[in-house]
Amino acid sequence: MPLNHKQIQTLIELVAKTEDRELDCDEFVNFLAEWSEKVMNGEAVATANASVRHHLDICPECSEEFRIILEILKESDGEADALLA
Ligand SMILES: [Zn+2]
């Protein structure tokens, strides 16, 4: 049975509402460790994905941690800002 237009529309809306899976703090810290190491090594820096940004928004502790690391990185490499660009 083919989907009618309304059913397809509903499916599209469902998919659009589904955000990237949310990170927990452990996953965020892992990401941060990997990311800062890359910046330190002068490697290409991947832009933060939506779930990382989302976690920064909802988690003051990780947000603070991230801010501190960003400050440290800024002193050695100006490209640390790339994550938030
Ligand atoms: Zn967190």
Image (tube, grey):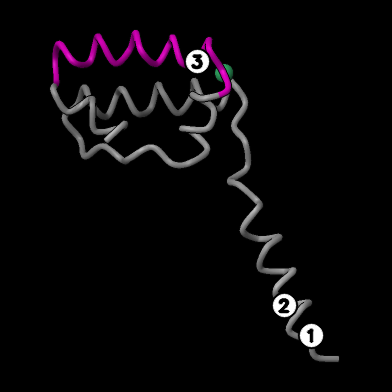
Magenta residues (range):
58-77
Q: Farthest residue to the front: give it.
A: 6
Q: Tell me which residue sits at (74%, 69%) in the image.
A: 10
Mark 3 Cα shell of 10 Å, populated few (<14), some (14-19), many (≥20): some
Q: Residue 62 carries which label?
A: 3
SS for callout 2: helix
Residue 72 included in the magenta stretch of the image: yes
Report the Cα–Cα distance between label 2 and label 1.
6 Å
Name the residue carrying label 2. Answer: 8
Report the Cα–Cα distance between label 2 and label 3.
38 Å
Q: Which numbered disc, 2 or 3, marks the residue that appears first in the sequence?
A: 2
Q: Tell me which residue sits at (17%, 28%) in the image.
A: 79
Instruction: Please state which amino acid type lies under the numbered disc 2.
Output: Ile
Q: What count of labels does the image hold?
A: 3
Relative to 60, is 41 on the left or the right? Answer: left
Instruction: Please state which amino acid type lies under the numbered disc 1.
Output: Leu
Q: How far across and how far down the image is residue 39, in percent? A: 23, 27
**Label pair 2/1, CB-CB below 8 angstroms:** yes
Q: Quadrant of ligand 1?
A: top right
Instruction: Please state which amino acid type lies under the numbered disc 3.
Output: Cys
Relative to 70, is 66 on the left or the right? Answer: right
Q: Is residue 69 above or below residue 9?
A: above
Name the residue carrying label 1. Answer: 3
Residue labelled 3 has its Cβ within 8 Å of some atom of ligand 1: yes
Q: Farthest residue to the right: give it.
A: 1
Q: How far across and how far down the image is residue 3, in percent? A: 79, 85
Relative to 65, is 39 on the left or the right? Answer: left
SS for callout 1: loop
